[in-house]
Amino acid sequence: MTAVSIVGGRCLTTSGLEALTLTFEGDTITALNPADSVASAPQKDPEGTATIDASGLVVSPGLIDLQINGGYGHDLQDDPGVVWELGRKLPRSGVTSFLPTIISGPRSLNRAMLEALRARPTGYCGAEPLGAHFEGPMLNTGHVGVHPPEHLTGVGADVINGWHRSTGVTMVTIAPELANALDAIGELHRRGIVVAAGHSAATADETLAAITAGVSTVTHLFNAMAPLGHRRPNLVGVALADSRLTATMIVDGVHVAPIAVAAAWNAKGPDGIALVTDAVAAMGQPPGAYRLAGTPTVFDGASVRTADGVLAGSVVSMNHAVANLAEFTGCGWHEALAAATSIPAGIIGETRRGRLDPGSIADVVLLDDDYRVHATICGGQVSYVDDAAQQRLRGSLAKVS
């Protein structure tokens, strides 16, 4: 088995970016040591070792997306079976693991997603699906966004029948104010599922009760929920004030204004915000007509909307969301990257992802100072190398592969 050392880069740690050498073997990081000079490290040698020269680059844990509906022309709502094709392309944006997300629809769609996750292709190399995120159908009819209203349901045991962490359901978004919602939240929590509040008009009291029942996360803060009122603080107010909740945000400059992103960041702090893309099929594609769950949409080059002007997901890639967060808030590299690595990993209890610690999964992305992805390694396998890095990294990456 080839041992691989990434040298010359600035590695993301909990305290910042440090000049360190990262070594992995197989799918596991084995060491993170003080840096050696690139000149003294052989590019490859006959004893089964390889060196990747990351000089001038940031070495980050792979990015984690907890809410993605599609991308690169693939719509999970149309065919959950494309999850593996989507996963093969996500390393282009530095994503090494993700939660394929199904919005409100026929229950057969949820079942099809779980079946697709069990049908792992032989020899798969790409971003790892970490289970499904079911965003609906137990949502507030007044805050549906682009979800088809005809597929929204009340809360009942029949809706969540078969949903369990062990069957592939990692996260569920629910409106806590619905009748019987607290019972469902408690049951989902007992099944090991991360429960998020979203698409909601919950009051502050209803939100606090939901936290007690098991809610730990808020889905795309500010979007598809009642706006914050200074006398009626509701879900948004509790999300900003209560450290027990981690909020996810779509930081594309469209879903949430930059100053609102900065306000949320200052309220929650760097440990309280996780980035999601909420990406749809148009991500990574040219402007034009697309569909989301059968609904016609148009990507105009900046946003994706229905004919009525309703936002229908985003086209932001995760590395660009990280760049936007740094720009909008003025936060440091390590804080912006944590919002796409260690924070989302913590939300779903992935203790071996989101960090470059020895023993962690060898999910690594090499980025330049503009947050452009040069190379992505998923579980110790090279999954993406951009054109500019091909010449520079060809020899060492060939041996890693």
Image (cartoon, grey):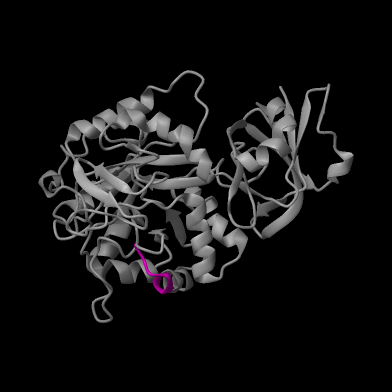
Residue 269 vs 141, above or below: the answer is below
Can you give x and y, in whole percent of width and height, for residue 41 in the image? 85, 38
Which residue is at 58% across, 51% downward?
Answer: 372
Can you give x and y, in whole percent of width and height, for residue 290 in the image? 27, 43
Q: In which quarter of the image is the N terminus?
A: top right
**Residue that sits furthest to the right in the current view:** 40
Question: Depth check: 368 or 121 in front?
Answer: 368
Can you give x and y, in whole percent of width and height, for residue 401 in the image? 65, 26
Lateral position of residue 282 relative to residue 381, left or right: left
Q: Which region shows up in magenta?
A: 255-260
Which residue is at 42% across, 74% downward?
Answer: 259
Does residue 306 appear in this view? yes
What is the quadrant of residue 6 in the picture? top right
What is the quadrant of residue 84 in the picture? top left
The answer to if 120 sits in the magenta stretch is: no
Does residue 95 appear in this view? no
**Residue that sits furthest to the top in the current view:** 122
Report how many numbered discs are placed on residues in the image: 0
Question: Depth check: 177 or 227 in front?
Answer: 227
**Residue that sits furthest to the bottom in the current view:** 231
Which residue is at 26% across, 77% downward?
Answer: 229
Lateral position of residue 194 relative to residue 186, left or right: right
Can you give x and y, in whole percent of width and height, for residue 151 in the image? 14, 44
Which residue is at 26% across, 28% downward?
Answer: 112
Residue 238 vs 376, above or below: the answer is below
